[in-house]
């Protein structure tokens, strides 16, 4: 059901909105959500300004940028940006402010990156000076009063994040709203399957089931786990699409396990919609992901998903659309990959995946987010 936009305060374009994130670029899950919301608001006549360090092209006519900088370097750069945001908001008279990162002040803060302490724990990382700065910024950004004496609201993209934020920061339930990520249901669609199969078969010839790993930051998203599980199967092939500065390490892992002919590293892709539709399975045994966009995008493309409970995106999996497994158990992961890569070739499974995704369309998510911000 669509929201009644005419019932919103400021629905006629008289709201001046600031959207805040240090990085504006064409790639990245947070960046994608920021651009989509900016375009959605601008198309409805609102004045939208993105506050960032540097930026790419505007996502829509009427969306402008305020480029903020500071002299801070190293681990203090994030704090310098937060201070610059505070100064900009104070002098610019925005009606509404939404923070996508650890900055202030704001009406709404979106915890799309989750809690930093949880990220460190899941990744087994030490707490460095840079991390201490991030933890301090997160605590300040979640302060109860944020903008012009109004109580800030916290938008979480999964129940995983909401539960974690409540536990770590003592946030009451009434301060937390869960709005999951959405998929562009026209772009990510089963009709792309034939074109996607052609791309994948060119890299991995034959008629074997193909599992797709798609994402950047291979260690966090669990590529090493997927490769270990693959070694316990014989029939499946694995296509890896995405970027990682340490990508050679995963290529060596596949080689050392004798999987060089069964794993294809495709690099960054400009056509994720084709790869997702062409694959028989999306495998994402992530160590920590507040909500991996690719989860709902795979379902929209008609492809089942095998992931972990540490991906908030697992919350959108319905019966018959995939499985949530223990990423540290290669046998369980291998079994799930075998089962769902076979089911991913059936029309019934692919129809169930598409049906599950249709209640998580991007337009619906943007409407709910905008209503929360403008209300």
Image (cartoon, helix red, strand yellow):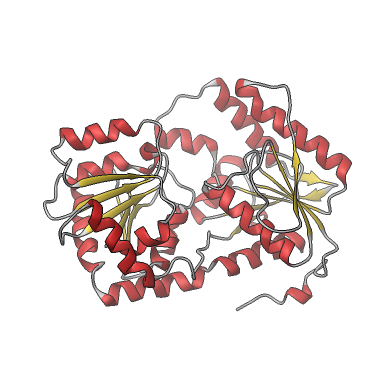
Task: Say which of 251 and 374 sits in front.
Answer: 251
Q: Residue at x 18, y 58 (%)?
A: 338
Quadrant occupied by the C terminus:
bottom right
Residue 297: percent from left, percent from top: 44, 61
Task: Say which of 177 and 230 sits in front.
Answer: 230
Residue reaching furthest to the left: 234
Q: Residue at x 27, y 76 (%)?
A: 347
Residue 329: percent from left, percent from top: 23, 45
Residue 219: percent from left, percent from top: 36, 37
Q: Is residue 185 visible?
A: yes
Task: Say which of 83 and 271 sits in front.
Answer: 271
Task: Tell me which corner region of the image, top left, top right, bottom left or bottom right, holds residue 174.
Answer: bottom right
Taking the image as shown, residue 125 lies to the left or right of residue 172, namely: left
User: Where 42 sits versus 292, above or below?
Assistant: below
User: Where 365 sits versus 29, above or below?
Assistant: below
Quadrant occupied by the N terminus:
bottom right
User: Where 87 sits versus 180, above or below?
Assistant: above
Taking the image as shown, residue 343 lies to the left or right of residue 284, namely: left
């Amino acid at each position: 059901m669509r929201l009644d936009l005419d019932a919103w305060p400021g629905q006629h374009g008289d709201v001046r909105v600031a959207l805040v994130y240090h990085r504006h670029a064409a790639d990245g899950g947070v960046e994608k959500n920021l651009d989509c919301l900016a375009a959605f608001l601008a198309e409805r006549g609102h004045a939208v300004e993105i506050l960032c360090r540097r930026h790419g092209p505007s996502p829509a006519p009427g969306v402008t940028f305020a480029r903020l900088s500071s002299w801070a370097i190293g681990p203090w750069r994030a704090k310098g940006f937060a201070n610059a945001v505070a100064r900009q908001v104070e002098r610019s008279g925005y009606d509404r402010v939404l923070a996508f990162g650890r900055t202030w002040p704001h009406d709404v803060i979106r915890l799309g990156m989750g809690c930093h302490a949880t990220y460190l724990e899941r990744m087994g990382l030490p707490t460095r000076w840079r991390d201490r700065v991030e933890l301090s910024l997160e605590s300040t950004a979640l302060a109860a009063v944020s903008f012009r004496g109004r109580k800030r609201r916290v938008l979480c993209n999964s129940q995983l994040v909401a539960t974690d934020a409540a536990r770590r920061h003592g946030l009451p339930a009434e301060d937390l709203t869960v709005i999951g990520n959405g998929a562009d249901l026209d772009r990510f669609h089963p009709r792309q399957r034939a074109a996607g199969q052609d791309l994948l078969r060119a890299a991995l010839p034959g008629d074997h089931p193909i599992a797709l790993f798609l994402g950047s930051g291979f260690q966090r998203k669990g590529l090493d786990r997927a490769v270990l599980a693959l070694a316990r199967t014989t029939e499946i092939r694995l296509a890896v699409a995405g970027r990682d500065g340490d990508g050679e390490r995963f290529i060596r892992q596949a080689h050392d396990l004798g999987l060089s002919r069964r794993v294809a590293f495709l690099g960054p892709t400009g056509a994720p919609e084709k790869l997702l539709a062409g694959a028989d399975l999306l495998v994402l045994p992530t160590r920590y992901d507040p909500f991996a966009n690719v989860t709902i995008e795979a379902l929209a493309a008609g492809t089942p998903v095998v992931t972990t409970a540490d991906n908030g995106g697992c919350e959108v999996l319905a019966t018959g659309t995939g499985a949530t497994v223990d990423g540290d158990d290669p046998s369980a992961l291998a079994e799930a990959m075998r089962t769902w890569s076979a089911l991913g070739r059936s029309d019934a499974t692919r129809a169930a995946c598409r049906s599950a995704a249709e209640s998580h369309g991007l337009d619906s998510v943007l409407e709910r987010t905008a209503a929360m911000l403008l209300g």
